[in-house]
Amino acid sequence: TVVAAAFHSAERRPEVARFAKAFRTRNNADPDPAAAAAYDAVHALARAMEGTETPTAGALAARLRSLPPMEGVTGRIAFDERGDLVGHKVVKLVVRDGRFEPLPDSASPRP
């Protein structure tokens, strides 16, 4: 079975490895997609606040839409002029031995 997810802690990107290690150290558990999304959201918001004199909701929303893309633990984070997330890639997971594992883009699931 192949499924799509926003995040998996075993994905082989440096951002994911650093985040997963720090999360495990602090929480004694693997991070889940919600933890990864929250982490990226806080980083994106902090980045928007750095370039905004008055951090009102409207100013922050406008700043988020104008920021260049950033690489987060859930992937590339960029917004269009309406504020929709664009260019975000999902992680393909396959069930092997009763556990979800990342499926490389070029791989096919085993029968």
Image: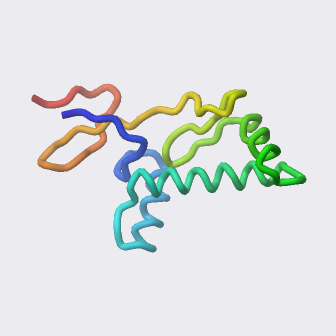
Quarter where residue 2 is shown: top left
Say which residue appears at 46% left-offset and 57% top-offset. Answer: 35
As rendered, which of 16 and 49 lies closer to the eye? 49
Residue 16, x across and y down, in percent? 46, 51
Specify the quadrant of the image occupied by residue 81: top right
Image point 26% across, 28% down: which residue?
A: 107
Quarter of the image with the C terminus in it: top left
Quadrant of the snapshot with the N terminus: top left
| Residue 25 percent across, percent down from the top left | 42, 72
Q: Is residue 32 above or below residue 1?
A: below
Measuring 82% from the left and 45% from the top, which residue is drawn there?
Answer: 59
Left or right of 94? Residue 91 is right
Q: Nearer the viewer, residue 39 or 105?
A: 39
Residue that appears at 37% across and 48% down: 8
Rendered location of residue 29, percent (x, y): 34, 67
Q: Residue furthest front?
A: 57
Looking at the image, which is closer to me, 39 or 15? 39
Query: Left or right of 53: which side holds 97?
Result: left
Establish if 27 lies above or below 1: below
Q: How is the image coloured?
A: rainbow
Q: How many marks?
A: 0
